[in-house]
Image: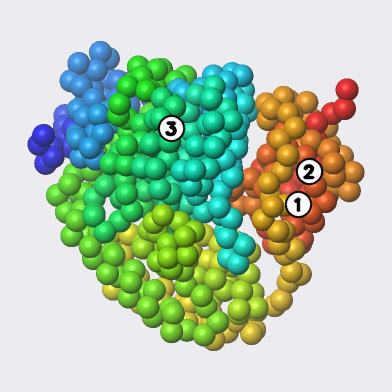
C-alpha cells in the first residue's frame, strides 16, 4: 500500500482549500465564532481543523471512504487484518473489546492489575470476572503481568470462559509473554485481548518488546497518544483471526462510542502512521539510545534504583520496554509522589508516573538532546535536595497476598446496591465502589470484593501521605460505599 498517503489529512486539506461553510456542528464554524482569548492560547488552526466526517471530510454517504482508507493503511502498517480508529481513548476501546467477547453473565479472564476502565467495563457489561493475579514483586512493590501457566490454570478451572484480557506493557514497562498467553487461550479456542495502551510504538522497531499482533493476539488496543504522536484520546483497535468478528467489534464500538468523532484525532492518527512507516525505525533507534544514556547517567546518582533488564533475568517479566525510565526513590527518604511534586515545583519537569515507591519517565521519538539534559539534571537536583523535602506519614504497604481480595459477588451487583458507611465499619463488608490511587489507576479495591483491615489501612495511610483517589465517592476515605445488607 502507498503509505505516503494520509487520507484524513488530505481530505482535511481539501476541505480547507475549498473554504466550505458548514451549517451544522461544530457551532464555532471552523473558528469564526471562537473567542479571541481562546484562540490566542489554542490557535485558530485547531478550530479550522475541527470538522465532522459526514458533510465535511466526506459526504453523508461516506462514499469517498476517507476513514476506511486510513484504517486500512494503519492495519497494513502494523500487520493486522483490520484496524478501527477510536476517539474516546483506550478506556472506551477496552470496554468495547470486552463487550465484543463476553456478554452479561458470561465469564472473562482478566489480569487483576488492570486499569480502572476494565472494572468499569465489567460493571457496564455484567460480565463475571475471573481474575488472573499478576506476578507480584514484593521488593519493588510492583505487579508484573501474569504468566502463561497462570492463564492456562484459570482456563482449566473455567472452561466456559469466553476469553482473556491481558495488560502489557504495564505502566512501568514490564511485559508479558504474549505469545505464550495467546497459545494458552487458543488451546481452549478463545480469543486473547491485549490492552497494549502503552505499546503503540512496538510494531516499528525490532529492539522493542513483542507487538501483540506479531505475538498472535486476536485483538489489541493501543493508545497512540501515550507513546506515539497523536493527540489525547487517540486509540486504535487492531484485529486478526476469526475469534472476534470485525462486524461485532464495530457494532459494540457504535454502541459505546461517540457519534461526533473528532477529526483532530483521526488526522493525527493518520499522520503518525505515515511518520512511523517512513521514519519510525530511525526515530525509535535514536530514542532507544537516548533512553540507555539517561538510564546510565541516573544510575550514577546516589539513592536511586533505576530499573532495567534485570527484571527479566530475575524471571519477573518476559520483556521490558527500555523506553520506560523507572526510578525507585525510597532510599532518598521520600515517596515517588513527593518526588514528582518537587520536580514540578522546582524544575518545571512533569514526570510520566509516580506511586509510593517510584517515578517514571517515558522516552519517545519526540525527545531530543534538550529534553534528555533537562531530565537528567532535574533528577540530579532532586537527589541533591531530597533532604530538604518535608517528610510525610509513611504509607503502610501491605504484603502481596493481602492485595488479592475475595470476590464475593459480581461487580455489577455490588455497584448498584450501595450504601455509605464510616471506614471503620467497612471492614468485612463488600465494596460497592472502585478505589484506585491515581496514577496509575489500578484498583486496590473493586466492587464485589471484601474489604480487609490491611487494605483499608494501606489506603487510608496513602491518603494521609498524599494519594489521589478520584473514583471513590469520598476521596478522603473517611467513608466507603459498600453493598447494602438485605
Disc on the earlier residue, 2 or 3: 3
Mark on residue 185?
3
Q: CA distance from mark 2 to mark 3?
A: 31 Å
Name the residue rendered at 47%, 52% in the picture: 170
Which residue in the protein does label 2 denote? Answer: 451
Query: Counting other residues with Cα less than 10 Å from the Cα at mark 3, is it few (<14), some (14-19), or many (20 or more)?
Result: many
Name the residue rendered at 46%, 23% in the picture: 101
Residue 91, horizontal then vertical, whole percent: 49, 37
Q: CA distance from mark 2 to mark 1?
A: 7 Å
Question: Would you identify the image quadrant in which residue 271 lies?
Answer: top left
Identify the colour scheme used: rainbow
Which residue in the protein does label 1 denote? Answer: 455
Disc on the earlier residue, 3 or 1: 3
* SS for callout 2: loop
Name the residue rendered at 19%, 56% in the picture: 281
Residue 422, horizontal then vertical, whole percent: 88, 44
Residues at discs 2 and 1 in contact (Cβ within 8 Å): yes
Residues at discs 3 and 1 in contact (Cβ within 8 Å): no
Residue 476, horizontal then vertical, whole percent: 77, 51
Amino acid at each position: 500500500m502507498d503509505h505516503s498517503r494520509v487520507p484524513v489529512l488530505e481530505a482535511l486539506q481539501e476541505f480547507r482549500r475549498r473554504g466550505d461553510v458548514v451549517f451544522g456542528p461544530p457551532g464555532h464554524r471552523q473558528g469564526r465564532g471562537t473567542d479571541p482569548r481562546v484562540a490566542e492560547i489554542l490557535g485558530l488552526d485547531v478550530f479550522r481543523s475541527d470538522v465532522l466526517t459526514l458533510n465535511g471530510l466526506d459526504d453523508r454517504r461516506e462514499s469517498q471512504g476517507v476513514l476506511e482508507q486510513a484504517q486500512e493503511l494503519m492495519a497494513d502498517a502494523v500487520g493486522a487484518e483490520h484496524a478501527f480508529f477510536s476517539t474516546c481513548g483506550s478506556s472506551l476501546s477496552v470496554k468495547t473489546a470486552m463487550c465484543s467477547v463476553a456478554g452479561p453473565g458470561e465469564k472473562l479472564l482478566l489480569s487483576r492489575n488492570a486499569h480502572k476502565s476494565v472494572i468499569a467495563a465489567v460493571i457496564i457489561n455484567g460480565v463475571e470476572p475471573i481474575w488472573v493475579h499478576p506476578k507480584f514483586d514484593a521488593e519493588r512493590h510492583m505487579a508484573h503481568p501474569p504468566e502463561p501457566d497462570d492463564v492456562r490454570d484459570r482456563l482449566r478451572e473455567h472452561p466456559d470462559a469466553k476469553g482473556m484480557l491481558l495488560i502489557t506493557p504495564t505502566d512501568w514497562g514490564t511485559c508479558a509473554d504474549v505469545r505464550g498467553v495467546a497459545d494458552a487461550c487458543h488451546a481452549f479456542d478463545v480469543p486473547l485481548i491485549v490492552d497494549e495502551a502503552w505499546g503503540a510504538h512496538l510494531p516499528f522497531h525490532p529492539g522493542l518488546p513483542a507487538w501483540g499482533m506479531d505475538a498472535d493476539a486476536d485483538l489489541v488496543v493501543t493508545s497512540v497518544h501515550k507513546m506515539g504522536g497523536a493527540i489525547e484520546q487517540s486509540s486504535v483497535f487492531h484485529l486478526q483471526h476469526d475469534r472476534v468478528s470485525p462486524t461485532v467489534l464495530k457494532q459494540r464500538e457504535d454502541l459505546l462510542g461517540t457519534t461526533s468523532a473528532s477529526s483532530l484525532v483521526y488526522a493525527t492518527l493518520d499522520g503518525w502512521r505515515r511518520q512511523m512507516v517512513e521514519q519510525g525505525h530511525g526515530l525509535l533507534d535514536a530514542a532507544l539510545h537516548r533512553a540507555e544514556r539517561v538510564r546510565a547517567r541516573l544510575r550514577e546518582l546516589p539513592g536511586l534504583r533505576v530499573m532495567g533488564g534485570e527484571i527479566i533475568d530475575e524471571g519477573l517479566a518476559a520483556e521490558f520496554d527500555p523506553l520506560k525510565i523507572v526510578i525507585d526513590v525510597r532510599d532518598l527518604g521520600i515517596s515517588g509522589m513527593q518526588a514528582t511534586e518537587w520536580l514540578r515545583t522546582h524544575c518545571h519537569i512533569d514526570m510520566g508516573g509516580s506511586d509510593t515507591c517510584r517515578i517514571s519517565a517515558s522516552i519517545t521519538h519526540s525527545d531530543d538532546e534538550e529534553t534528555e539534559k533537562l531530565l537528567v539534571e532535574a533528577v540530579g537536583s532532586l537527589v541533591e535536595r531530597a533532604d530538604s523535602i518535608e517528610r510525610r506519614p509513611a504509607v503502610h504497604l501491605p504484603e502481596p497476598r493481602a492485595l488479592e481480595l475475595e470476590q464475593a459477588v459480581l461487580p455489577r451487583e455490588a455497584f448498584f446496591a450501595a450504601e455509605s458507611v464510616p471506614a471503620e465499619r467497612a471492614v468485612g463488608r463488600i465494596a460497592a465502589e472502585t478505589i484506585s490511587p491515581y496514577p496509575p489507576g489500578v484498583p486496590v479495591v473493586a466492587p464485589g470484593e471484601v474489604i480487609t483491615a490491611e487494605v483499608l489501612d494501606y489506603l487510608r495511610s496513602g491518603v494521609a501521605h498524599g494519594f489521589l483517589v478520584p473514583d471513590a465517592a469520598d476521596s478522603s476515605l473517611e467513608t466507603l460505599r459498600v453493598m447494602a445488607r438485605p
